[in-house]
Amino acid sequence: MTVHAPRTAVVTHGRGPRYLARAALELVGATAVVWIALGWGAWWVTLVVGVVVGFTVRRTRRAWVVGVGAGLLGWGLPLAWRALGAPVGGAARDISSLMGYSVAGVALLVTLVVGGALGACGTWLGRAARAYRPSRHGSASSR
Amino acid sequence: MGRGSDGGRRGGWRRHLNAALALITSGLVVGAALVGSVPTVPPLGAAFDPLTGVWQMTAGASVAHSMTLTAGVSHDVTVSFDAGGVPTITAATDADAMYAEGYVTARYRLLEMDLERRLGEGTLSAVLGPSALASDELQLSLGLTRTAQAEWDSLGPSSPQRQLLVAYSKGVNLAMSQMEAGHQLPAAMTLLDYRPAPWTPVDTLVVQGDLTEELDYTTSPADMALLERSLGPTRTAAWFPVTPTTPQAPYDPGPYVAAPLVPIRAVIPGTTPTPGVAVPPAPGRSSVRSSALGSGPLSGAQRAEAASLMGWIGRLTTTVRHYGASNNWVVAPSRSANGQALLANDPHLPQTLPSVWYEVAIDTPDLRLAGVEAPGLPGILLGRNDRVAWGFTDTQNQATLLYRETLSASNPSYYRWRGRWHALRTVSYHIAVAGGASVNYPVRISVHGPLVHLPGGTYALWWAGDLPNQDLLALVGLWHARDAVQVRAALQHWTAPTQNIAYADSAGHVGIIAPGVYPETAHGVPWLPLSGTGADDVVGTIPPRAVPQVADPAVGYAVSANQRPVTAAYPYYIGTVYDFFDPGYRALTISSRLAATTAATTATMASIETDLGDRLAVTLTGPLVAAVRASGAASSASGRAALALLTHWNGTMSSSSGAAALYWTWLGDYARDVFGPWWSATHVPVATDANLAISPATDAALVMDLETWSTRPTPGTALTLPDGRSRSAAAVMAQAFTQAVAHLTRQEGPPVAWRWDHLQSRQFASLTNAPALGYGPRGSGGDAFTPDAADGFPIAGTGPSWREIIALGRARPGTTPATSTGVYPGGQSENPLSPWYETWVTTWWDGRSHPLPNPARPARPIATWELRP
């Protein structure tokens, strides 16, 4: 006979190591998908990843962390990786200047904001869609 | 947005609201990421994709040290890059070399090339938005594309020019497709959200037209008409004369050939007259009211009309030239230290990053070239082969004429010409505008050229640059020339822009010749708007044997620096001091330097190229010092110190010179004191036409007047005030001295703190106008009249864009052969992250240069690319 822990217990235990490990795994996976897609020029996949995360991850806070985090990391880490062998700082200065800004950080900020915003919007859409998912009792749920 | 817990159920309306907000917000974000708001905001998703968007400029900056690619060449081609990024192209055929040249040029200058063709083709608005619409309309009216298309259509299938143009275009397109596939298009294109269209031979010919426009399209007839209207014909003729009243150093002093004019065979596209009719389809009186450029004082409405005209005709402020500055000269073996012929050239063009030049060397069985190309044009424009060398300066003869057309009142699509009515030809354009509605733009063309429509009149522009030309054929001839005779023969094909082409060959022959079209009218005053009735039409050009030229000059050298190349005895009209020869100070300085040496070396040539001597300053300082002493204007401590600066000054506009700072400030005050009262009293419309502002740096006629009036008594000068009171030149000079000292003391402190580079600087602006991608402003020496010219005050954006010094022939036994050198202030790559972006800025600034590559013995390459069939 299987004994299910009460929901309150899940919440309590969910912030423990297993919870964090699962969240980290989801974040790494989502980030990897975003990164790979960006290599193909498929920037919109960030939104799709957010939708999937928002829809499938049960916990709202974790969904937001994973969805937005994948957007930020998926767009930021490739730049960090690029910076190991290329003058990304100089590029930021030049791109910002081409955009009409004298502050080099503008290009970097825009990049991260775009990634983060796509991830956030996807997550939000996913959560909103999840609210229409039929519950176990046959009605729409916000889970 | 959802709450912080997964549990609980929401009310239906909240769930719907949340979903709606999520959809709306996501729609906005995706919209911004997908389409942006062109042209101000690019599609953010694609543009800032960290792996395929603008950040790829870091990848584009790296140099592929070894690369083999399949290309459309007939044999293997090798491209070897030296440390500065200068490619030496080794190919089995000329066409293969041009293919490779197109490829490497596009790899490093694609944005520049694309902007240049867009400029000429009137398609800048499609990427830059409404701000470029005026430029596009002007270009479509001028018709560089119509001319380029006519040139292309005239080339037979087997003509060498066609083959070279096609090969170059294919190379460009290969580079373009590779860059696009590798997400390495220039970052600016990504931000502007466009992909360049395939390059065509017509694009190349349009870029060539851009250069022509920059060098000899002027607004001078309109300027002169406004001056005459304000100052009156007598004063305008006296103060803006046809021939200079100051000492000159023409390279062709005569005697001259007064041969009959020869017809201009080329026809400006669209100007073939339609059949004339005695009565237009709907007869009526002329609708043309009194022209804004007629006679008498300008009314308010006429001033508005004139402003409209100038606004239209001068839309391309960066390309409309009223004042030029370039130097070239040759030294015969008899005057060089080692017996070699020497040639120097430093064309003064806008100094930008990237440069207007791209350095290249080409080696084929038929060609051995080293020099610079204008990105977009195959081969080289300036440089050498193994037997001859050449360099260009702008001749600056009048190449733009303005015709006043009479349109039918009832049917304005007809104009009056040679006593009959002719239908205007119309070419319609559709101008795409990024971020705005597209514009339909019809261009109407009379027998004289494209029309300018104004409330008060209709004008047509006749411009030599609109003539289909065979300049590329001339260049091909130059590349292959083996001696001076072949150089001159090749240049018979040159049309526009007229250039003073200095040449030297390995046998020691040197010379300068100014081939091209010089429009001559049978009647009328060409420096003013002409009648469109037919009486004042262009009837021909100066025959090639009579154009300004000198071959193997007896003095052993010849100099061109945009000065009037001939004396007043020359039997043809070639322009006025306003349109638009240089006052000649640089030519005098260079000539005197060369006359002073009988053993010139490349070091001599380099020191002349970087000479900061101002001949006008030398001339005026003596009278100025005398005037100040006589007037007692230097009675104060600062006045005495300032006078001491001038007393010990030799006219050198060096960076640290306090005297130079004082002199230039004084010259501006002096010009304003002399001419200002007249400009005010006669209402010279400076606000309408900025070219008419009193500026010694840009108006050759005014400084020449000042020189003449300050050094010898002259009747009818502006020194006599409009109310009849007379002033002496000395009194006005002293007055301006007091003003200048007060001005500088306020601005800079006591005279000991004055420096010229506090006032004058140079700037190499980015073509994108992005401040961080440019260089400077940085304080510098030089002014508009020094051989090392700084054109523009207080920030010079034009100056020596390329300095080449070439030695040809064998050195005398016991002497060392000279090394040919070149340098431009910039680098080979337009990518700001590239190590080749600003490579030679400091080199140029310090007056140094690097050896021109020797195609036969390329330097040890740091990168080698192979192009295979």
Image (cartoon, coloured by chain):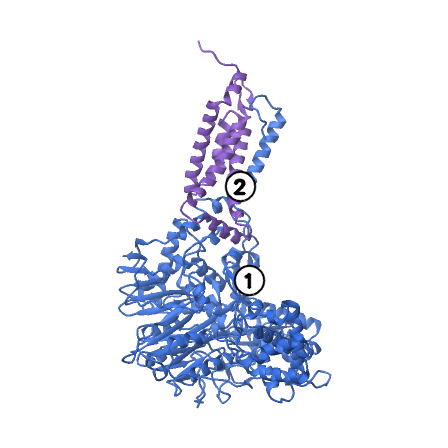
Chain colours: A purple, B blue
Q: Please state which of residues A42 and B418 is positioned toward the viewer in this rendering.
A: A42
Element type at mark 2: helix
Amino acid type of disc 1? Tyr
The residue at 45%/37% (across/down) is A34
Q: Which mark is residue B741?
A: none
Q: x, y (%) of residue B207?
A: 44, 65
Residue B593 appearing in the image = yes
Amino acid type of disc 2? Val
| Labels 2 and 1 within one chain | no
User: Mark 1 Cα within 10 Å, few/some/many (few <14, many 20+)?
Assistant: some
Question: Which chain's residue wears label 2?
Answer: A
Q: x, y (%) of residue A15?
A: 51, 23
Task: Identify the residue under disc 2.
Answer: A113
Q: x, y (%) of residue B180?
A: 40, 51
Q: Residue furthest top?
A: A1
Q: Is residue B96 left or right of residue B37?
A: left
Where, by quadrant of the figure, is residue B736 drawn? bottom right
Q: Please state which of residues B684 and B159 is positioned toward the viewer in this rendering.
A: B684
- Per the model, the C-alpha gap separating discs 2 and 1 is 41 Å
Quadrant, the N terminus of chain B: top right
In the image, residue B432 sits, relative to residue B459, either above or below, namely above
User: Mark 2 Cα within 10 Å, few/some/many (few <14, many 20+)?
Assistant: some
Task: Identify the residue under disc 1.
Answer: B441
In the image, residue B542 sits, relative to residue B752, either above or below, namely below
In the image, residue A61 sits, relative to residue A98, either above or below, namely above
Which-is-in-front pick, marks 2 and 1?
Answer: 2
